[in-house]
Amino acid sequence: MAGADREPESERELVVSRTIDGPRELVFRAFTEPRHLARWFGPDGFTLTTRAFAFEVGGVWDFTMHGPDGTDYPNWIRWQEIEPPARLVYEQGSRPDDPEAFQSTVTLTERAGRTEITLRCLLETRAQRDKVVREFDAVEGGKQTLGRLAAYAAELAAGGR
């Protein structure tokens, strides 16, 4: 769909937010360094293997998420905007030419030593959004992912690795 025919963004988006104990710089670092991402990224029970990681505008993070049932989910992210420590924008799909790739925006707001993080995924159509909610339980998966980030950030803030 193009131009005026496109469905409103509010009908194509998924938004998940959480307040995390820890400063924004720490949360940003946890979201942008492979050694940290390996510890928390993905819903409960998931692990990941990174094949490539270039954290720069136009750079790619190529990784596989491993589900608790043994299913592998290829993932590919191209960083589009990087504004440390406040904002990230990236395109995500299963591969570079994925017709169902979507754009995600991560916003980090400092709140008196805590960080409010908002993850907004904008899909091409309402039908695509509804499909990822139905088939992948994307909203709950997003909540679990941010929950894992919160736990990991607390560990870092307490002096963990």
Image (cartoon, grey):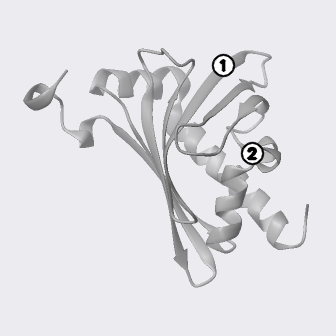
Which x, y percent locates residue 128? 36, 22
Query: Helix or strand or loop: what does disc 1 sit on?
Result: strand
What residue is pinned by disc 1? 74
Question: Label 1 neighbourhood size at 10 Å, few (<14), some (14-19), many (20+)?
Answer: some
Question: Label 2 neighbourhood size at 10 Å, few (<14), some (14-19), many (20+)?
Answer: some
Q: Quadrant of the N terminus?
A: top left
What residue is pinned by disc 2? 37
- 76 to the left or right of 127: right
Which is nearer the eye, 40 or 137? 40
- At 58% from the left and 66% from the top, the residue drawn is 85
Which is nearer the eye, 76 or 69? 76
Which x, y percent locates residue 123? 36, 31
Amino acid under label 2? Answer: Leu
- At 66% from the left and 19% from the top, the residue drawn is 74
Query: Helix or strand or loop: what does disc 2 sit on?
Result: helix
- 14 to the left or right of 144: left
Looking at the image, residue 64 lies above or below residue 105: above
For marks 2 and 1 on the same chain, the one whose residue lies earlier in the sequence: 2
Q: Quadrant of the C terminus?
A: bottom right
Amino acid under label 1? Answer: Pro
